[in-house]
Amino acid sequence: IKMDGRNQLNDSLVSEFVLLGLSTSQGTKIFLMLIFSLLYLGIILGNLFIVFLVIADSHLQSPMYFLLANLSFNDVWVSSTTIPKMISDLSNEYKIISFQGCMTQICFIHIMGGVEMVLLIAMAFDRYTAICKPLHYLNIMSPKRCVSFVVTGWVTGLIHAMSQFAFVINLPFCGPNKVDSFYCDFPRIIKLACTEGAKFEFVVAANSGFMSMGTFFLLILSYIFILVTVWKRSSGDLSKAFVTLSAHITVVVLFFTPCMFLYVWPFPTSSIDKYLFIADFAVTPALNPVIYTLRNKDIKIAIQRLSKCGHYNGLC
């Protein structure tokens, strides 16, 4: 085990961690490397295309698409915190990450996670306003409010990450350095510390656990409220609203299930959570462009307009 030159009492600080990854079988590694490379390519192209489309098409300058573009931009970063490193590690026998690299990865995961949660709440609020208060929609979802949602997301993400990071950065790591996952995160790292970790586990559960659970139930309640409102107004016909919201609910369940599994009742004794988190880092960011665009009439029309622009050499 590579150690740092500093000493705390009789303990040296670990300067790197070994990520055990997903699989030890060579055949499985090649298969996973191919799958995740394709997924990551799809995430980058799909989400950046949405950002480009919303910026380029004047017909998409509305609150819903402004928030969608920010969600897509954030999804690129969410997947980029772990997937490139995981793909690289699948081709290496020794999966090493420096102490500084590990701490940086943890920070970015939680910053982006905090932003994602706030953006999902903002998008649910946008749908609630559009369906339940259509006459006041543009006043409520003003440009100023939309920007404030995004700013709130980044501030929340920073506070969320740094409030936990402040506890973990000073923990003594004096020996064990094997992380049973493909990425670094607070629960796994705290288990390796050479100190009683109960109070630090509580900090993570109180912070990440409460945030995950609170956001999840707030989103589910908002969708139930929307469905009830539609049901009352349309004499019991929920089919159209349910089809629209089912896609959103799928994304919410996929994103929050791993978070709640890992953070609400720390700390994992099995390695199941690392497989669940593939949903957060690879599956959800890949699905978002599909769910929010292919089922959306405005986006389809915008793509047609873009293709016509290309056909006429950019003269629109």
Image (cartoon, rainbow, N blue to C red):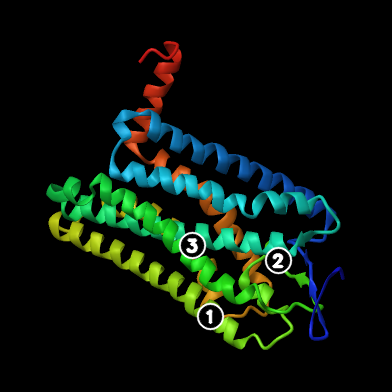
| Quadrant placement of the N terminus | bottom right
At 40% across and 17% down in the image, what residue appears?
Answer: 308
At 59% across and 82% down in the image, what residue appears?
Answer: 200
Q: Mark 2 points at which residue?
A: 181
Q: Mark 3 points at which residue?
A: 158
Helix or strand or loop: what does disc 1 sit on? helix
Residue 37 location, x and y as percent? 68, 44
Q: Which of 137 and 25 is in front in this view?
A: 137
- 91 in relation to 8, above or below: above
- Is residue 107 visible in the rendered image? The answer is yes
* Marks 1/2: CA–CA distance: 21 Å
Q: Which of marks 2 and 3 is in front?
A: 3
Q: Mark 1 points at which residue?
A: 203
Residue 9 location, x and y as percent? 79, 86
Sequence-first tag of 2 and 3: 3
* Marks 2/3: CA–CA distance: 24 Å
Sequence-first tag of 1 and 2: 2
- Is residue 182 visible in the rendered image? The answer is no
- 219 in relation to 244, above or below: below
Helix or strand or loop: what does disc 2 sit on? loop
At 48% across and 68% down in the image, what residue appears?
Answer: 160
